[in-house]
Amino acid sequence: MDETDSLSDEQLAGQRLVVGFKGKVLDDDLRFMITEIHVGGLILFKRNVSDPSRVSELCQAAQACAKESGQPPLMIAIDQEGGPVARLGPPFTVFQGNRAIGAARSEKAAREFGTITARELKGAGITVNLAPVLDVAPQGLNSVMADRVFGEEPELVAYLGKAVIETLQNNGIAATAKHFPGIGRTTADSHVDLPYLDAERWLLDSTDLVPFRAAIGSGVEAVMLSHVVYRDLDSAWPASLSTVIARDLLRKDMGFKGITMTDDLDMGAIDKHFDVETTVRRISDAEIDIALICHDRLKMEKAYRALLEAVRESEDERRKGTGSVRRILNMKRRYVRDKSLE
């Protein structure tokens, strides 16, 4: 029997949401998201973490809540890139980040980061690292990603990114290649507003897409889509809402079969331009598996209702949604230690 056959419409909708929350413990708000919105996963920020034992207690309590309420195990994600984006501070190991690894051109440093980070995340009950950043930042450009990339050479970014991906996943943590199809050329910050990029397809093919091809070849579990409009690919929609980019380029042309997810839908790039219903409709059309919403609970609830409506709308929408949930459950089986998925 297909494992999705046992899920309700509400679960099929909720499993495609990964959400943020405010507290450091399993409170009523978090319990509501797990039991009533049926969310597929959680994302942790600095606001949720203190010492390792308390992070572990939080993750265990959330997983127990999911199990007790008849939900699939949770995907628990975090941005632990090292450098300027690391949600877990001391006593977790502090790394200088991609820029330092790239400057040293050191596969050893990349694998050391992957090994230690995986061990610490796994010990805390986290299952997915939203890393590595695979953006390429060309020399001389004031890239918004300058402090977070391995460098300006596509082959070097691909080489070091592949090392991080393989090491994280070999040590029990799912990796996420981001931000597809590459935001190293952008100078505007999608946290604030919607960037537009005029780079032609041939240029993206020869530079920005090189690390993502390597990541797909190395079996990366997930790819995060950027909130950038690539005019030469799709002049109407950002990658995170684009059928042309998410379905046609990433899945059909590049052969990616894993999890696709949006960047945070609370960012200004999306929030200032698209309502929740439009956003969810675009995600469904593009067959993007996971909608990531990190802050706004009202938006989470609206997205859930829109996803539920899509599941019930037609057999085609149900088929696409079920395919996404099947991929999500398959990844959970590999990285969430829970006998109910075995």
Image (spheres, rainbow, N blue to C red):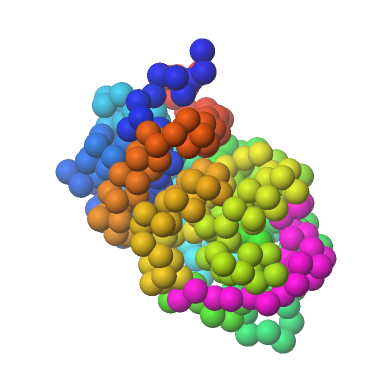
- Taking the magenta stretch, the answer to whether it contains residue 120 is no
Q: Residue at x 47, y 30 (%)?
A: 315
Counting from the top left corner in percent of width and height, residue 171 is at 61, 38
Counting from the top left corner in percent of width and height, residue 231 is at 65, 72
Tell me if I can see residue 96 in this picture. no
Counting from the top left corner in percent of width and height, residue 58 is at 30, 42
Q: Residue farthest to the left?
A: 28
Q: Quadrant of residue 234?
A: bottom right
Q: Is residue 18 left or right of residue 212?
A: left
Q: Residue farthest to the front?
A: 314
- Taking the magenta stretch, the answer to whether it contains residue 213 is yes
Q: Is residue 110 left or right of residue 316?
A: right
As rendered, which of 342 and 118 lies closer to the eye?
Answer: 342
Q: Residue at x 30, y 44 (%)?
A: 305
As rendered, which of 30 and 315 lies closer to the eye?
Answer: 315
**Which stretch is magenta?**
193-214
Q: Is residue 170 left or right of residue 272?
A: right
Compared to residue 230, the image places residue 281 above or below, namely: above
Counting from the top left corner in percent of width and height, residue 148 is at 59, 70
Q: Residue at x 35, y 40 (%)?
A: 309
Query: How many marks can you see?
Result: 0
Q: Residue at x 81, y 67 (%)?
A: 202
Compared to residue 297, the image places residue 68 above or below, namely: above
Compared to residue 72, the image places residue 62 above or below, namely: below
Tell me if I can see residue 4 in this picture. yes
As rendered, which of 133 and 321 lies closer to the eye?
Answer: 321
